[in-house]
Image (spheres, rainbow, N blue to C red):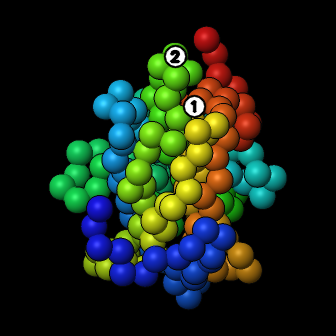
């Protein structure tokens, strides 16, 4: 885990910039006590109604860029496991919130859960790679397979970060249904 210089506790919020922040990176890391327990990051770009504007408005390992090209997933980085770059100059104005989720791969099939995870974190970096805010998770539940670790959202014309830390017993398909993405089998 990198040294986190501006950690928040669960439920705390922090401003990202005065107005629109330009380009930010949301970076993630974790470890696991069970070697089969691996996770992936996804980002759901939501409108004011809390739903995606369309079925392709989420970023994950199978779709690394958002339709407006504002969000881009990267893996295999030297310090963090995965990062999602957010370019606010390209972000669709209908998007009011981006929810970042860690989901354990094949959790139902392999009986995996967040009680097997540790050292999970999210940190927000500016264009100079300076940390603006971070959230080191401290609660790991055995009834959770997906964790809404954090979100960035627009409030009165400014963007903020919220350290969420709430989990659900849903896989990626279940999260898609929760946020309004129609998934075909």
Identity of the residue drawn at 68% across and 62% down:
96
For the residue pair 122 and 183, the one nearer the viewer reads as: 122
Q: Which residue is mark 1?
A: 172
Circle 1 SS class: helix
Quickly name the residue at label 2: 109
Q: Earlier in the sequence, mark 2 or mark 1?
A: 2
Residue at left offset 45%, top offset 65%: 136
Q: CA distance from mark 2 to mark 1?
A: 13 Å
Q: Quadrant of residue 154?
A: bottom right
Q: Against 136, is 141 above or below?
A: above
From the viewer's side, name the closer residue of 67 and 121: 121
Name the residue: 29% across, 56% down.
80
Can residue 149 be seen in this snapshot?
yes
Position above or below: 150 against 6: above
Horizontal side, residue 84 vs residue 91: left or right: left
Q: Position of residue 56 (x, y in %)?
A: 58, 35
Q: For residue 59, say whether it is visible.
A: no
Looking at the picture, does residue 35 appear above or below residue 179?
above
Residue drawn where x is 58% and y is 39% of the image? 142
Secondary structure found at label 2: helix
Snapshot quadrant of residue 36 = top left
Between residues 13 and 10, which one lies in front from this camera angle?
Answer: 10
Circle 2 or circle 1, nearest the eye: 2
| Left-right relation of 64 to 92 | left
Q: Position of residue 12 (x, y in %)?
A: 63, 76
Quarter of the image that includes the N terminus: bottom left
Extreme residue in the bottom direction: 18
Left or right: 153, with 86 as reference point: right
Farthest-out residue, left: 78
How many residues crowd around disc 2 within 10 Å: few (fewer than 14), some, or many (20 or more)? Answer: few
**Mark linked to residue 37:** none
């Amino acid at each position: 885990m990198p040294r986190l210089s501006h950690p928040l506790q669960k439920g705390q919020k922090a401003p990202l910039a005065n107005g629109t922040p330009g380009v930010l990176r949301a970076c993630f890391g974790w470890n696991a006590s069970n070697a089969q327990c691996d996770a992936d990051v996804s980002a759901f770009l939501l409108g004011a109604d809390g739903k995606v504007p369309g079925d392709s408005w989420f970023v994950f390992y199978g779709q690394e860029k958002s339709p407006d090209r504002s969000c881009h997933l990267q893996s295999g980085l030297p310090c963090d496991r995965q990062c999602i770059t957010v370019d606010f100059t390209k972000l669709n104005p209908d998007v009011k919130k981006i929810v970042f989720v860690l989901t354990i791969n094949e959790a139902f099939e392999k009986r995996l859960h967040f009680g097997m995870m540790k050292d999970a974190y999210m940190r927000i970096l500016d264009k100079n790679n300076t940390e603006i805010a971070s959230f080191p998770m401290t609660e790991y539940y055995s009834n959770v397979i997906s964790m809404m670790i954090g979100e960035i959202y627009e409030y009165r014309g400014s963007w903020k970060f919220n350290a969420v830390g709430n989990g659900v017993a849903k896989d990626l398909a279940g999260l898609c249904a929760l946020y309004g993405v129609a998934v075909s089998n």
